[in-house]
Amino acid sequence: MKILGIECTGRRSSVALLRDGHPPAVCSLMKDGKPATQFLVSTVQELCRESGIEPHDLELLAITKGPGSFTGLRIGLTFAKTFAWANNCILKAVPTFEATVEGMPAERKTVEVVEDLRRGQVAWQRFEFQDNLWQPATSLQMEDLDSWRQRDHTGIYHAGAGLERLARQLPNREWPADWLCVPEEEWMPDAMQVAALGRRLYETDGADDPFQVTPIYVRKSAAEERAEA
């Protein structure tokens, strides 16, 4: 199966092409430490050209749908839905937190993905390794930072965007010594993880309708809140 994976909301933003029997091809979407979504179209074109693949040859497009950067989500999903429709390609939009734990070692057993929402709030979701797969142990939650940090975090590994910002809001402005944390390079998913999860979820749940896919926003953007006010 020829799969295009896209992640353009975090520090591991990238595009990946996976084909059965071939090594994966990956292109970064990062520039100056930030996702460069303005290069998404040209990066996909370059990756297909270098791999000898025409866009209409792709069978599945997998992309993260959030939580994540408002701008990255909107640009990425708009591209993905348009591409899937124009090339008659299957679309699978996957939750960013689920993609984050995809491929992590089973020995970690429990991982909590966290995102700093600022304004004293966090989004979080726990996952457990069961039946040879990482599976959600809770639904996606939004909670006040003080309530979240008072929960029992014993034996739980932490990942996710904004862990550095969260640490600065904790007592002594540092991550507690007894709170486990995955290596920094695993805090966010890359396009290969997105492609792998997209294939698995497509095989179990089927395709997504490009006209019905919407981003997962834990809270409204600051611009939307100002507009409502």
Image (cartoon, helix red, strand yellow):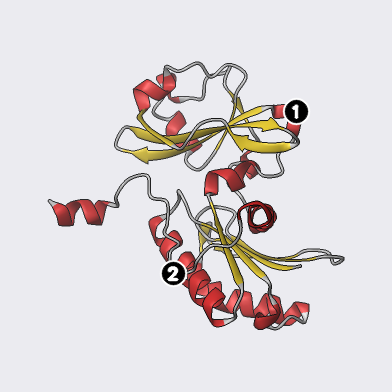
Q: Residue furthest right?
A: 21
Q: Residue at x 24, y 56 (%)?
A: 223
Question: Label 2 crowding class (10 Å Cα cut-off): few <14, some 14-19, many 20+?
Answer: few
* Furthest residue in direction left, as rendered: 229
Q: Nearer the viewer, residue 1 or 170?
A: 1
Decide: few, some or many residues near mark 1? Use Cα within 10 Å; few <14, some 14-19, many ≥20: few
Image spot of residue 33 (x, y percent): 53, 56
Snapshot quadrant of residue 78? bottom left
Which residue, given by chain and number where applicable, does mark 1 sit on?
Answer: 107
Q: Look at the numbered discs 2 and 1 and tell me whether their residues touch, using CB distance below 8 Å.
A: no
Q: Amino acid at mark 2?
A: Phe
Question: Which is more foreground, mark 2 or mark 1?
Answer: 2
Q: Is residue 126 above or below residue 220?
A: above
Residue sitting at x 41%, y 64%: 74
Can you give x and y, in whole percent of width and height, for residue 216 in the image? 42, 51
Snapshot quadrant of residue 53: bottom right
Identify residue type, mark 1. Glu
